[in-house]
Amino acid sequence: MKRAALIIVRVVLAIVLGDLLARYIASLPYEMSPLTDSIRFALRAFGQTQLDNPDDIETLALIVILFASIGVAALALWLATRGLRALRARASHQ
């Protein structure tokens, strides 16, 4: 039960931190042409030759940014957890 609660807390924390990171990134001035070109390539690779609405590419780019940010936040949380475990193990052996 305790392990399931910790997993749920970590998942929720990763989503919240990822959302905050995505909002920060989306507020920055940047050129999205490499990202939009990559999305267009992926769409063509899956057989979608054209979008119904060309403005949807910006929405897809923001979704990619959101998922990438959640992944980065989850990785950072995982690394922090591993680091804390290592510190605790080192402290208990001394």
Image (cartoon, grey):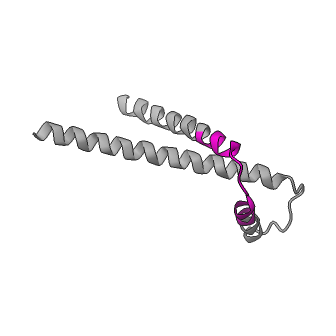
Q: Against 51, is 69 above or below?
A: above
Residue found at x 24% / y 41%: 87
Q: Residue 30: x, y in percent?
A: 71, 53
Report which quarter residue 70 is drawn in. top right
Image location of residue 11, percent across then percent down: 50, 37
On whether residue 38 falls in the magenta region, the answer is yes
Instruction: Decide whether the magenta segment is chiefly helix, strand or loop.
Output: helix
Residue at the outermost left position = 94
Q: Residue at x 59, y 41 (%)?
A: 21
Q: Quadrant of the C terminus?
A: top left
Where residue 88 sits, quadrant-wise, is top left
Q: Residue at x 84, y 68 (%)?
A: 49
Residue beneath the point at 77% across and 69% down: 44
In this image, 31 relative to 80: left or right?
right
Would you say residue 22 sits in the magenta stretch?
yes
In the rendered view, tell whether residue 47 sits above or below residue 9. below
What percent of the width, then of the height, locates residue 29? 71, 49
In the image, taking residue 60 as reference, residue 77 lies left or right, namely left
Which span is picked out in magenta? 21-39
Q: Quadrant of the N terminus?
A: top left
Does 83 appear above or below 41? above
Measuring from the top left, give residue 3's x and y in whole percent: 37, 33
